[in-house]
């Protein structure tokens, strides 16, 4: 039962092959029996899940079910969930029980989805390996000595090990696509503003976007259909109507114009990963797509631009954690300044402190113009490169990551080495575009991803392009050893 | 550009972060590496470029100035480290 996609499980529920309670019990038992190995969950919520499943079964019996009713999922612990601990992977929020639901949580619950629990993540989503979590690293189900990627590493490991059939994630610089690539999943980040950020604990507000980690592109379409749409509670929510994403699947892609930027194929790209991407491009050629070279001349500026913009926004966003209204407070503060400084110094981990300080520095008097303002200019150059490319082509393709999953502890000594792991995904967030990573092969037994980038609000076409690849290949159905 | 231990102490204070004295050197090293790395942005020719405000050029939405939120004080204060009579408690600030 656990190797089925959401679409397949939905068919099973509809045909009465199993109830939502049986389905949910199956995943609850798997989490209970297996998650000790992966550490994918911070807070499993089995009782709540079974209660939601019984409600879903009643809805199905009454004939009020939607396409997602009764299907289980896991939420990244960045999404506020009413009455449930919402930690964001931080000691700072270890004692925080959210008094409200994030819009994403609310919408998926209204659609009838069942929440299995809250997944592990890099602290405040700052990391590319899930090693900055207060709750310890997550292990990659494909090789437990490797990282699952990050920051949505718990969500990725949970789905890869089939402890959940799907999960939510958030993507600020690659935090859905990179872990999806490293664990053999389909990771989808919609256009900036497409899915509400309300109740999604903020890291860098001009870059953050919620999305999905699923087995297939079809599943991503199913979930995104329920998650997307205008929300007045998010001041940057896009006022665009949501098309029928499922209806877009199945369209012929003959004549599709695919742009391949040589800048994605630099000397840092592992040769076997490159081969997997080349093979994927051949699949598209056989489907009648036309592949041409396009250039993103400012791509090399994207990682440094990101490491000014994102820390600047994070230093501002994380000022709300002050030890006064919620979250961690230090013992015996001697005065108010001591309370602020020690609550934050003790409540945040090292990577979060580095980014808060980097952000404080680039925004501080005398440095603002040289760093923050300059980064907003280089960000414009990067965005404009994409706009120009999309005048010529429908989608862009390249690798999601330079290499397959790396070892736990391998890149923790030097922050820059870790940052460069997101070199192919970061520019997409700076430009606000939608993108998906699809499993494109195995390198030394580890999955690698093909990244497909679409134009603004062109999610339907993007998901169909991914879906067509998955009709021709079975990389997305491969399982790690021992998952059966 | 290299950041000194004193720079780190100053930035940490601006950010209201207590950094333990034995960790200052390591932060100085790491932050210097990060600042060196982002310094390459200075080489980009941006004289004619307007800084980007929003990737999709969207303007901030306005709403009518009416009350939309109900009072949730008691519920919210359940997450607070210390409260009394509906107020958040902090160490004395006025002697």
Image (cartoon, coloured by chain):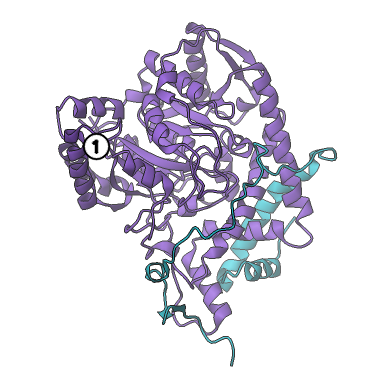
Chain colours: A purple, B cyan
Query: How many circles with numbers are drawn on the protein?
Result: 1
* Quadrant in which the C terminus of chain A appears: top left
| Residue A74 appears in view | yes
**In the rendered structure, the residue with mark 1 lies on which chain?**
A
Viewer-nearest residue: A123 or A37: A123
Viewer-nearest residue: A271 or A372: A372
| Residue A32 appears in view | no
Residue B47: percent from the left, percent from the top?
Answer: 85, 40
CA neighbours of label 1 inside 10 A, class few (<14), some (14 to 19), many (20+): many
Position above or below: A202 against A435: below
Viewer-nearest residue: A272 or A287: A287
Q: Which residue is rendered at x = 64% and y = 54% of the image? A: A312
Q: Quarter-wise, where is residue A363 in the image?
A: bottom right
Outermost residue toward the bottom in this view = B95
Position above or below: B12 against A140: below
Left or right: A359, with A199 as reference point: right
Residue A157: percent from the left, percent from the top?
Answer: 35, 40
Residue A311: percent from the left, percent from the top?
Answer: 61, 53
Position above or below: B35 against A142: below
Q: Which residue is rendered at x = 39% and y = 13% of the image? A: A472
Q: Secondary structure at mark 1?
A: loop
* Quadrant in which the N terminus of chain A appears: top left
Position above or below: A260 against A165: above
Q: Which residue is rendered at x = 70% and y = 40% of the image? A: A379
Residue B65: percent from the left, percent from the top?
Answer: 59, 57
Q: Which residue is mark 1?
A: A70
Left or right: A147, with A359 as reference point: left
């Amino acid at each position: 039962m656990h190797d089925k996609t959401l679409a397949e499980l939905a068919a099973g529920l509809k045909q009465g092959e199993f109830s939502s309670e049986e389905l949910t019990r199956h995943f609850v038992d798997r989490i209970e029996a297996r998650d000790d190995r992966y550490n994918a969950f911070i807070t499993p919520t089995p009782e709540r899940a079974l209660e939601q499943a019984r409600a879903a079964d009643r809805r199905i019996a009454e004939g009020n079910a939607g396409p997602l009713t009764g299907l289980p999922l896991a939420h990244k612990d960045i999404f506020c969930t009413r009455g449930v601990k919402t930690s964001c992977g931080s000691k700072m929020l270890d004692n925080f029980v959210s008094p409200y639901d994030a819009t994403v949580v609310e919408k998926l619950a209204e659609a009838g989805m069942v929440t299995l629990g809250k997944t592990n993540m890099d602290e405040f989503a700052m990391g590319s390996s899930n090693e900055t979590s207060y709750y310890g690293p997550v292990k990659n189900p494909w090789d437990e000595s490797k990282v699952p990627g990050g920051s949505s590493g718990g969500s990725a490991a949970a789905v890869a090990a089939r402890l959940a059939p799907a999960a939510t994630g958030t993507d600020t610089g690659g935090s859905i696509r990179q872990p999806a690539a490293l664990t053999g999943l389909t990771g989808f980040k919609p256009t900036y503003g497409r899915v509400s950020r309300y109740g999604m604990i903020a890291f860098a507000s001009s870059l953050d976007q919620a999305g999905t980690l699923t087995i297939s592109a079809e599943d991503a379409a199913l979930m995104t259909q329920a998650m997307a749409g205008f929300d007045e509670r998010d001041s940057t929510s896009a006022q665009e109507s949501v098309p029928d994403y499922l209806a877009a699947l199945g369209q012929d892609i003959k004549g599709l114009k695919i742009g391949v930027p040589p800048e994605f194929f630099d000397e840092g790209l592992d040769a076997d990963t490159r081969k997997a991407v080349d093979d994927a491009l051949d699949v598209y050629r056989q489907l009648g797509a036309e592949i041409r070279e396009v250039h993103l001349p400012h791509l090399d500026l994207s990682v440094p631009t990101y490491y000014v913009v994102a820390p600047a926004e994070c230093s501002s966003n994380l000022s709300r954690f002050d030890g006064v209204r919620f979250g961690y407070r230090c013992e015996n503060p001697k005065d108010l300044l001591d309370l602020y400084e020690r609550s934050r110094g003790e409540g945040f981990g090292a990577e979060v402190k580095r980014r808060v300080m980097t952000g404080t520095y680039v925004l501080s008097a005398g440095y603002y113009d040289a760093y923050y303002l300059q980064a907003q200019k280089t960000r414009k150059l990067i965005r404009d490169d994409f706009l120009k490319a999309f005048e010529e082509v429908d989608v862009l393709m390249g690798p999601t990551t330079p290499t397959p999953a790396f070892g736990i502890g391998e890149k923790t000594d030097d922050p820059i080495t870790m940052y460069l792991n997101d070199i192919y995904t970061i520019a997409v967030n700076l430009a606000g575009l939608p993108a998906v990573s699809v499993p494109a092969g195995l390198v030394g037994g580890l999955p690698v991803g093909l990244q497909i980038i679409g134009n603004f609000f062109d999610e339907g076409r993007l998901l169909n392009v991914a879906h067509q690849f998955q009709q021709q290949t079975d990389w997305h159905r491969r399982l790690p050893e021992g998952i059966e | 550009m290299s950041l000194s231990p004193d720079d780190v102490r100053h930035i940490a204070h601006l950010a209201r972060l207590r950094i333990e004295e034995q960790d200052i050197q390591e932060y100085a090293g790491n932050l210097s590496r990060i600042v060196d790395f982002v310094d390459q942005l200075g080489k980009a020719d941006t004289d004619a470029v307007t800084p980007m405000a929003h990737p999709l050029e969207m303007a901030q939405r306005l709403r009518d100035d009416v009350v939309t939120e109900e009072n949730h004080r008691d519920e919210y204060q359940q997450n607070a480290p210390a409260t009394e009579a509906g107020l958040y408690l902090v160490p004395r600030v006025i002697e």
